[in-house]
Amino acid sequence: MLSAPAAILGAGILWPTAASADGSIAAESGPIVRSGSFQSKKYSYAFTPPPSCTAGNKPLRTHLDEVNYSSGTRGYTYGITVDPVRINSLEEFGTPQEVGKRVADAEGARDGVTDVKLLSAARLDGLLGGRYTYAVNYRSEGSRGVKLFYTRIYVGDGLLYVLTGQVKEETMRGDDDGRLKEEIDRALESFTVV
């Protein structure tokens, strides 16, 4: 299943990609673990997941490259996807608020989702390869409960990179000492595209 950012940015601007006979797109990178970090072999990104997370992959890949992480806490996960796009920067697609609205709208169109609220959308300081990263955070309510999504979206060299962290809202409500929020912030900040 496409992440909401990949779904909206891919709408009409994806380059054609080769798929296997079953329709899936094979990932061409695999984890290189260095001090708890993940670095793509083929694509130029790195991510340091929280210590509680372990890498795993979906049986059917739907992106050019994707890596998923799950924690011991149900509903607390991270995913990184890479997809080809025809734009050269996020600015070509819109402002952070415009992209955030499109992400929220795409999430709202998914099966079982009954309500989506855009919590924040911002352009992050610090350029990656002369381009900015957008931070889009939203709340999704549906048949599988209420989830909070934290994303980092980057476009460069014809590729869309998306890091998505998700956690159940009830888990965040139980984060009285703020440790989980700090853990999420550290993980999001560790995502780099070089």
Image: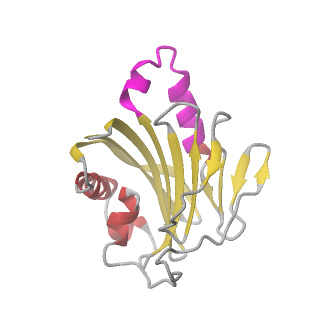
Q: Going 37% across and 25% down the picture, which residue do you hit?
A: 170
Residue 125 horizontal/vertical position (percent): 50, 49
Q: Is residue 94 above or below residue 157?
A: above
Residue at 68% from the left image edge and 35% from the top image edge: 51
Instruction: Answer left or right for 54 relative to 169.
Output: right
Up-down: is 138 above or below 130? above
> Which residues, given as a range, are shown in magenta?
168-188
Relative to 70, 113 lies left or right: left
Give the quadrant of residue 148: top left
Q: Nearer the viewer, residue 100 or 173?
A: 173
Residue 130 in percent (x, y) is at 55, 65
Where residue 92 sits in the image (x, y, percent)?
36, 71
Residue 50 versus residue 7 in the image, above or below: above
Of residues 142 and 106, the one nearer the viewer is 142
In this image, 104 relative to 176: left or right? left
What's the magenta bit mostly, secondary-structure-wise?
helix
Q: Residue 45 magenta-drawn? A: no
x 64%, y 33%: residue? 52
Residue 79 screen position, x and y as percent = 52, 52
Q: Write the residue at 40% across / 78% down.
A: 14
